[in-house]
Amino acid sequence: MAMSMPSEELQLLVAGYVLGDLDPEEAAEFEQLLAQNPAIAEEINQMQAALEAAYTPPPVAPSAHLRSQILEAATAASSAPLSIAPRKLLSWRSALEVAAAALIIALGINNYRLQQTLQTAQRNPQPSAGLTYVLNATDANSQASAKVVVDPKSLEATIAVQNLPPLPPGKVYALWTVVSPAAPYTTDDKKAILTEVFEVDERGNFSQTIAVPKVYRSKNLVAKVAVTIEDANAPQKHIGSPIMITEL
């Protein structure tokens, strides 16, 4: 730990140390910090003083009549055959103040730990469950294949294509999302949504992150995913037949 830690974090550690609420690892770490930075002892003293003040209410001078009664009672008590020393009792108000102070500090420590857990979760988010679509060539002699992995929450997908032959000028590959008949989305006459237009490199490969339509939020509404060859100037006409398609 360095002395540059936020003051809020330091105060919570001091509070936990004074209350004995630190676990062994935290306590050892704090004691090491204390050894390196003796000035922190002043923070501990202030915290202890605050708690002691809650235990000890301010003194109030009794009236002359009450003082006389107290002295008489003390004299009588000193002559009684009792061996137990009188105990100093906390008033209900003092006890409640102590409990409130301890609760506030404990809640502060727990809140800090919760914030740390949340920040850790935000820095290391758990991957969401993706939808994977594997496309195989419709031609038995073709080695072409593709995989589309969709995140239904962000509506982003990664597409990876292999072994597709480069196309002549004026032609492109089109990725289609074919939806079920009951899907409430606008499609062409083949119940398909144009999802991406792409070209492969000289080795026949293509990979990219793309946006996908909202139909992917409901897996059951996606019937198939397919790739066709279309005219570059009007791929949305959907003239070509599937050269790769999923078997869902």
Image (tube, rainbow, N blue to C red):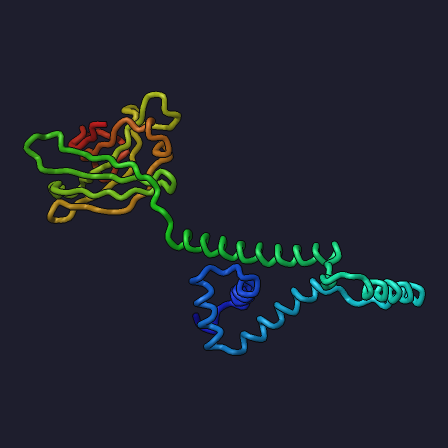
Residue 26 pos. (x, y %): 45, 63
Which quarter of the picture shows residue 127? top left
Left or right: where 152 falls relative to 132: right
Q: Residue at x 25, y 47 (%)?
A: 208
Q: Quadrant of the C terminus?
A: top left
Residue 209 pos. (x, y %): 28, 46
Q: Tag count in the figure? A: 0
Which quarter of the picture shows residue 164? top left
Q: Quadrant of the N terminus?
A: bottom left
Residue 132 pos. (x, y %): 26, 37
Which quarter of the picture shows residue 39? bottom right
Residue at the outermost right position: 65
Residue 56 versus residue 187: which sits nearer the camera? 56
Residue 238 versus residue 134: which sits nearer the camera? 134
Is residue 145 placed above or below 20 in the rendered structure? above
Q: Residue at x 74, y 54 (%)?
A: 92
